[in-house]
Amino acid sequence: MLFKRFTPLITAVRTAWTPSGLEYKQGQWINNVREYFYYVDHNGGLFLDDSRMKNFTSCFKDKRFLRFFFWRLKPTTKEEYIDYFPYMSPCGKECNFLRCDDRPIVFTELDTDEDRFIYNNSTKSVPFEPSKLCMFPNGRLYHPSQFATYGLVMSKLADDLYHDFEFDDRGNPIAFTYKGEKIQLTNELLKYAEKEDSEDPRDVTD
């Protein structure tokens, strides 16, 4: 929900859907490393980057794979790919490169029994900190993450949380009610919204 308020491989392969048009072939061997290319959408779904259909039926669902993939996630170290795929998840002699619609970490489920925010449809999670939920000027909801500083809350989950927010006269969220307790929002993540356009998209500092 949007709240109101390598030198690239030159072959005869189809150019994958990337903003700058990097050419690659899934499973290509470069310097004895097999490379794959992935994409995370705003709902936290993980897809092969060049798949034509990107919806729930075509995203990866094996939680063991997803856990391992996101556990190994780090900024891309291959200079030729940084502008195209700013993240990577190495696995032995394979390396999975990743780009995303918004953030690499997308919170997809809230476990209210354990107070944990589960991300990217995996079994990995971070502690849920209600006071640190933050709405950016783009209307999307964010929460701190251990990787890449903060993650996106998927639209459906944001919809579910919407009615627990309290807004000021300008329509900005100022408090959130969780388990019967009214919690003031720190909005500390807004500093990243202000610097979003100028900062390195791979920033992982806290």
Image (tube, grey):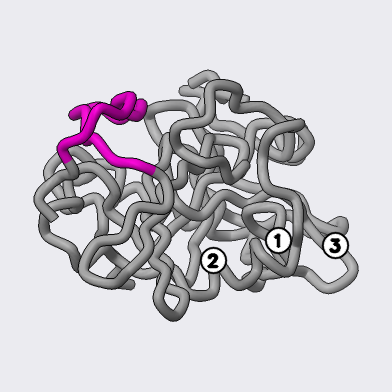
Is residue 3 covered in magenta?
no
Query: N-terminal of the two: label 2 or label 3?
Result: 2
Q: Residues within 10 Å of mark 3 (few under 14, many from 20)?
A: few
Question: Which region of the structure is painted magenta?
Answer: 10-25
Q: Quadrant of the N terminus?
A: top right
- How far apart in space, not on screen, are marks 2 and 1 (Cα)? 8 Å
Residue 148 visible in this rendered orientation of the protein:
no
Q: Residue at x 29, y 40 (%)?
A: 24
Amino acid type assigned to the residue bearing label 3 in the image = Thr
Q: Camera-side residue: 116 or 30? A: 30
Q: Residue at x 15, y 44 (%)?
A: 8
Q: Quadrant of residue 111?
A: bottom right
Instruction: Please provide percent x and percent y for residue 124.
Output: 67, 70
Amino acid type assigned to the residue bearing label 2 in the image = Phe
**Mark 3 or 1: the one toward you:** 1
Can you identify the residue that label 1 sits on? 122
Can you identify the residue that label 3 sits on? 112
Q: Camera-side residue: 27 or 136? A: 27
- How far apart in space, not on screen, are marks 2 and 3 (Cα)? 22 Å
**Circle number at residue 70:** 2
| 94 left or right, relative to 112 | left
